Structure formats: C-alpha cells, structure tokens
Image (cartoon, grey):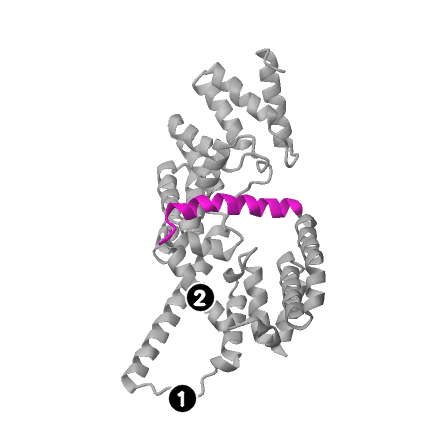
Amino acid sequence: MVAILMIFCLFILKTRSVLLAALLLGFVYLFIERWKLFLVTIPVFFLLITALYYFKEDSADGRLLIWKTSMGLIRENPIFGLGKNGFSKNYMIQQAEYFQANPGSEYSLLADQVNHPFNEYILWLIDYGVIVFSIICYSIIRWFKNIYFIYNIDKIVVFFILVASLFSYTFKYYFVIVILVFCFSNVENCRLKFRIHVPRRMGILLILIFVTTACSMFIYIRSEIHWKAATNSIMFDEKKYLTLEKELNQISEFHHDLAYKLFEHGEYKKSIAQIEKYESMRVNYDVTLLKAFNFTSLGEHHKSSEHFFLAKYMVPSRFLPKYELFRIYKEIYHDQEASINIAREIDQTPIKVKTDYTISVKSEVRKFLKEHKTTK
C-alpha cells in the first residue's frame, strides 16, 4: 500500500520522466505477456517518446546542451572522475568554453546558470568516473535480477526513481533516499532473516558515533539558524560571520553570502578571498560577476574584464557582463575598436526577457553605434 502511494505521489509531480517510466513499464509488460502486441506498439512507443520531447522542447534542448557540454568533463578523467564537486567546479567554465568556440550556437538563448546536469548518472561519471559508475550500475542490475521486476511493487517504485534520475536531480531530495531504503529493505530477498549479535564494546562505539553525529548535526543546525538571522539583519556583523564560518566552512552559499556582504561594505579584497573559497567548491555566473565587480572597485580593470569576459560566455543571453565590458573598453581603455565590437555584439543579442535594463542598454549601444556610423 505504501509503495502504491509512492507511485501516486510520483505521478502527481507531472514530470515527463515519470510518464516515460510508465511507458517503459508498459512496454516491458507487453514484451513479457503480449509479444505480438509488443511488436505492433513499437512505432507508437517511439511516437510517444517524441511527443514527450516536444511537450517542453526548450527545456529538453536545455538539458541536451548540458549533457553535451558535460561530455567534455567526462573526457578529462573518465576512469576516476574529477572528484567531489567535480561538476560544480568545472561545468560553467566548460559551458563558457563551448560558447566561445561556438558563438552562433542555437543553444545561446537556452543557456543559463547550471548547478546540476539534470542526470544523476552523468554526475556520477563526472565526479567519480567509470569505475564507481560501473560498480553502482552492476549492483542495481543485480538487485533487479531480470525483467520480471514489474510484478514487484517495490522494484517498480525504484524503477520509477531510476528513470526520473535520467532527467533530474532526484538524489538531492532526502525523501527519495528514504523511499529507496524502504524499497530495498522491503524486497523479500533483502530482508534480514537473522539477528545480528553486536559485541558490547562495538555497541558502545556505535552509541558514541551516534551521539557525536547527533551533536555535530545540532551544532550545524544552530549555526544555520544564526546564519539566517545574520543574513536577514539590517546591520552587517562581520565578526559574527567569521565565527559562523568555522562551522559552515563547507557550505558554498555561506561564502557567497559573506562575499556579497563584504562587497556591499567596501571590503573588496576580503570579498575576493571569500569568493575564492566558494570557487574551491563551485563556480557560477553570479559569483564570477561579483568577482569582476570587486576588481573593478579596486581599479584592477584587466582582471575585472577577464571575469566579465568569462561571464559573458557562461550565459550568452545576459546583457550585464557585455555592457560592463563595453563601459571598460569605452571609458577606461578608450579602445574604440573594442568598444564598437562589443556594442555590435550587444545590439545583435536577442532579448530573452524584456526589462527596463535590457531596453536601456540596447538603446545606449545603438546610439553609440550610430554616432560612429557602424549601424548596418
């Protein structure tokens, strides 16, 4: 009954991956029970798969871009992977390199900040390589045993989750992990049919480990609460943040938050130091821009232009990094040729979301191009 409820919950999410899992399940059933009907429905199956693609075409194309770009990260170290945070530290740089090499790409408008490849298996390959990935896949296949898993409700739930993992970040949700543990333990062959005798000393050690873990979690949760209070506070308390950093040092967003607060209060070098801590765990468009603005405020325009240039290619549809480069070339370097080139690029960039800012930027560069008689 619980497993049926889990499947129902998956269906009400209305995601294409759940619908795909249902199609695959039906396809396997026909293969086992209705062979002739299975052959007849093959074309229908592929038509339905195509329909799922066109149901949200832009979303599907965005994922295709992410997977295509991710292949470059897999090739860097296919055997052992790039290690923990391998994807988050390297993907946006890889995406920037892709658009720098393919400036007219059809994916330019679809590209955005990416924190996950929307495929758990690609993430495993990037972070941990083929060896770990193969061990995980082998274990899963061994657990399913054969295609007759469709008659076991717990295995069906796991199947739905595994298919959803092809297109989403399912394992980031704790309730999904709980469901998996429940299903694995509930399958007949996985039930423990004997009591495990734990020696007294081992029992004491396990209790100590449990207590230590519980205390660490308590300290972490308390620090999170204090961090939230500090973030919402009108007054910026740097000392409080530095105290919290001892407990929250491994949380990238903490360093992002502190870097932004330091930037707002004119502590540009300290802000850059926090950004570098953040970048040891992940790299993204927003933090790259923040780093560029820090260097601009310090008067280090060469470094700021490097980071604006990187941000420009990370998300090609954004106007902010291009406009800041335009200002640097025009007002700082007085480089007319570079100013004209970036102005043309801004003028030719389609507006993805029309705002007062994008309209004003377009208007300014068009006026500049007209003054220099470069409008086509």
What's the residue at 66%, 61% (across, down)?
Answer: 19
The residue wearing badge 2 is 138
Q: Position of residue 8 (x, y in %)?
A: 66, 69
Going by the numbered disc 2, the residue's amino acid type is Tyr
- Frontmost residue, 196 versus 292: 196
Task: Count residues near mark 1 (Cα–Cα under 10 Å), then give few for <14, some for 14-19, many for 20+.
Answer: few
Please state which amino acid type lies under the numbered disc 1.
Arg
Q: Is residue 65 highlighted in magenta?
A: yes
Which is more toward the observer, 369 or 9? 9
Q: Circle 2 — which element?
A: helix
Is residue 311 rendered to the left or right of residue 243?
right
Q: Residues within 10 Å of mark 2 (few under 14, many from 20)?
A: few
Answer whether residue 258 is visible to the viewer in this image.
Answer: no
Residue occupying image coordinates x 42% and y 51%: 126
Camera-side residue of 223 and 152: 152
Q: Are marks 1 and 2 in contact (CB under 8 Å)?
A: no
- Outermost residue toward the front? 36
Is 184 part of what is drawn in magenta?
no
Q: Which residue of the protein is positioned furthest toward the left in this rendering?
A: 201
What is the chief secondary structure element of the magenta stretch? helix
Query: Would residue 62 be seen by someone viewing this image from the given angle?
Result: yes
For disc 1, the marked residue is 195
Image quadrant for the C terminus?
top right
Q: Which region of the structure is painted magenta? A: 57-81
Question: Closer to the N terminus: mark 1 or mark 2?
Answer: 2
